[in-house]
Amino acid sequence: MKHLGVIIAIGLGTFFTPLYGQTNIIATGDEWYYYDAENAPEIGWENELQLTENWKKGISPLGYGDEGIKTIIGFGDDPKKKHITKYFKKTIRIDNPFEYLAYTLKVQRDDGIILYLNGREIMRNNMPDGIIDHHTTATGLINNNYEGSLLNHVIFPEDLNIGINIFSASVHQARATSSDCLFNLELVGENDSGLVPLLLKEQTIKSLNLNLRLKELNHKHEIENKDVQIKLIEQSKATLKSLLYTIGFLLLVTLSGLLYLWITSTKSKRKNEQAITELKNLNDLKNNEMMGHSINSYHNQQYLNGLKGRLEKVSKKDTLTLKKELGKIIHDIEFNIVHEEGWENLKMHFNAIHSGFHDQLKNQYPVLSELELKHCIFIKLRMNTKEIANILHVDPRSVQAARYRIKKKLGLDENTDLKEFLLKL
């Protein structure tokens, strides 16, 4: 470490006055890397140790166009179109940053400068705000009276790394025709007790800035959380909307399927009902036809019975030959009426149409004779007295007498109509 004495910068007219408890860590005359090519250096130049392959070395002050420059750097081939920006970088080792209360940076520049410590910008002078690139010009020209003036900037121990620290700077011209360029930097470690108020002030400012930064970060974090919540809500809405669309589509498909099945089932049911109705009608028609045939058959049977009786009477009065012929006729008639198939067929078809009416009536009223059951069936078929008499080949008065006997056996009083009773039974 060199103790700072009185350093006279010849030609610059600048005096660095020593203070109590000061130590030069970076001094005028130290070696720096510099980059003065036409194109910008690689990205990350300000913080990467290894990005110095195309860089040159020289002692400070560095620049051109002024007396006292120790290292003259390039500006290109055209004096009227000089390179706007030059770059400088130096690496130092500090094993104990807290050896000093504070550190003062003393900087000379022409025209504008941006200073970095370990890749972090710590000072900007005579430069516009915002993003700076290789072609960004300084805000204004530095006239001759201020070219050698010092810029003082305090940094604190906690700003430094334990070990390697990188100081970097980009110096920008205000115009491509600028006649001079200057860069010089000293780093002084200070333990003067007079710095305590400044340290307290800086620490307070830092604390306030830190609090503001924390508030800003918290606010930013809250905004990000809200943004995340909003995105989650939007995603939930989108998912719910998609789910509702899916459910709606499935419901629509299901309802369409059910409607189709219902329509198909209804058509099938109507078709089956129509077919059943047609079959019932056809069956009723056939039953009615069978009933008619049965009635006619029974009528014929009864007619033949009557005819047989008449012939028997005639045969008693005629001659032997006539008697013999009539006997043959009677024999043929007997052959046709020997079986009671006509009545049985009539009963069968009647029961089919009227749900076993004959058998139910016979079981419920066993006192009724077979002839009386026949009368009940004919009455159920809505035949009048004369029609019944013709079928049975009896006198209508016999039919009336039979009705009276049936009412009595059924236990009906005189005011009850037999026909109405049988129709309701």
Image (cartoon, rainbow, N blue to C red):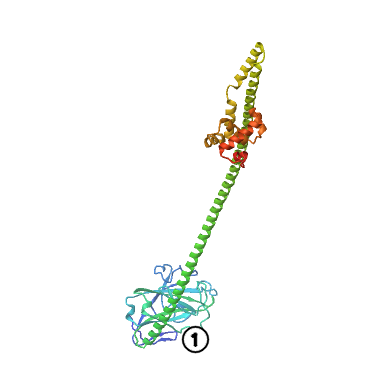
Q: Is residue 392 visible?
A: yes
Q: Is residue 351 left or right of residue 37?
A: right
Q: In this view, does 152 lie to the left or right of 350?
A: left
Q: Which residue occupies the foreground of this view, 31 or 332?
A: 332
Q: Which residue occupies the foreground of this view, 9 or 353?
A: 353
Residue at disc 1, secondary structure: helix
In which quarter of the view is residue 300 placed?
A: top right
Vertical placement of residue 45 versus 271, above or below: below
Q: Mark 1 points at which residue?
A: 145
Q: Is residue 356 left or right of residue 98?
A: right
Total numbered labels: 1
Give the crowd class for mark 1: few <14, some 14-19, many >=20 residues within 10 Å.
Answer: few
In which quarter of the view is residue 397 placed?
A: top right
- Extreme residue in the top direction: 321
The residue positioned 60% from the left and 22% from the top of the image is: 337
Give percent across and percent down for residue 394.
64, 28
Q: Which residue occupies the foreground of this view, 341 or 128?
A: 341
Q: Which residue occupies the foreground of this view, 179 or 231?
A: 231
Give percent across and percent down for residue 125.
48, 80
The N terminus: image quadrant: bottom left
Give percent across and percent down for residue 425.
58, 40
Q: Is residue 349 visible?
A: no
